[in-house]
Amino acid sequence: MKVVLLHDGGSDEWSATDVAAVLGNIREVEQILRAAGHTTETVPVYLGDLTWLDRCQKADLVFNLCEGIGGVSRFEDYVVAALELARVPFTGCRSWPVTICHRKHVANTLLQAAGVPVPPFALVHEPVVPKGLRFPVIVKPSMEDASVGIDEGSVCHTPAALLERLAKATAAWEDVMVQEYVAGREFNVGFIGATALPISEIDFAGLGEGKPPIVTYAAKWEAGSDYDLHTIPVCPAKIDKSTAEQLTRVAERAWRALAKCEGYGRVDIRLDAAGTPWVLEVNPDPDLSSDAGLARMGRAYGWDYSALVLQVAEEALERGRAALAEGALSGRITS
């Protein structure tokens, strides 16, 4: 089988570290696919260039590791939409959940409509205190991912602090979300298709005094920072069976509502002091590196990294076979 490994081609502004991070994941996935007997081709995506799509159309499977174009995350939406039009099986979520989840306010609205517990929120475009929200609140750019725009000042306890934060946030981003902050333990539930993986918990013990226990940009991208050193995943989470079942049920409802249990993803949840789970985000196509959270959950499930990668590929191929069968059936009915 011929597999195209699709990735962001980067830009002139990328550092050597940025390039290495992208290509490192490509190489480890490529080695696994080749060891399984497949032929691979690495294909970069550049802004204003569609030659990548023609190369994808000649493949049996596209292993989509493209998280944007030139580092702009919202362009990931267009890449996935183009892959759907190409009618070639590809790994990860379809364009609808990818696009929706890049717009946090839209995703939250849909989750609420599906009966999924989501902390109350408001979309703002200027420094104003939204009505009806209880403090403390957290401020996030509504159309970013990877914790962009989130730091220790994101949690606001007073209207004055919120107005100050919003003055900065609305100057940098057009759409800003203000959401009630849920104090409590934070959990992640990963999915490959309809399969829920073991739950992971974020251990914030040891954070500096006064720093809110949240997953900031620094926690993900600034090695050696206080948040990096004290935002530690524990998988499987140390919770009782009843709590695990409760978290998984809520995560499955969120995953089904937005992703239709297709592709791979992660649902982030906070458990408040009363034991109520609140969905913070649904993340389609999270980092698939061997040292990332989804791989950690896979190992706890019993899959080594190679097994996880091949499972991601098989889920995509199975969807492709189902779509082909559906199309053939439709053709017989209409002929």
Image (cartoon, rainbow, N blue to C red):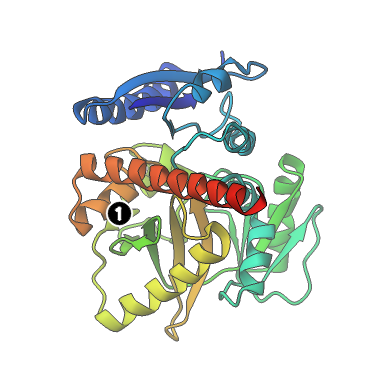
Q: Which residue is mark 1?
A: 232
> In terms of image quadrants, where is residue 239?
bottom left
Q: How many marks?
A: 1
Q: Is residue 122 above or below residue 146?
A: below
SS at mark 1?
Answer: strand
Horizontal side, residue 319 vs residue 314: left or right: right
In this view of the protein, can residue 280 be seen by the observer?
yes
**Residue at screen point 64% across, 56% down:** 104
Would you say residue 211 is visible in this rendering?
A: no
Query: Residue at position x 76%, y 42% from top?
Result: 171
Q: Nearer the viewer, residue 40 or 24?
A: 40
Seen in the picture, residue 176 relative to 9 is either above or below; the reply is: below
Residue 50: where, in percent of width, then height? 62, 18
Q: Nearer the viewer, residue 324 or 311?
A: 324
Q: Which residue is pictured at 34% across the width and 63% down the height?
A: 196
Packing grade of label 1 (10 A; few <14, some 14-19, many >=20) is some
Q: Would residue 128 be found to the left or right of residue 196 on screen?
A: right
Q: Quadrant of the N terminus?
A: top left
The image quarter in which residue 289 lies? top left
Tell me the kind of residue under disc 1. Answer: Ile
Q: Position of residue 122 (x, y in %)?
A: 73, 65
Residue 16 location (% of width, % of height)? 41, 16
Q: Residue furthest front?
A: 335
Q: In which quarter of the view is residue 204 placed?
A: bottom left
Say left or right for 308 vs 52: left
Q: x%, y% of residue 39?
A: 31, 21
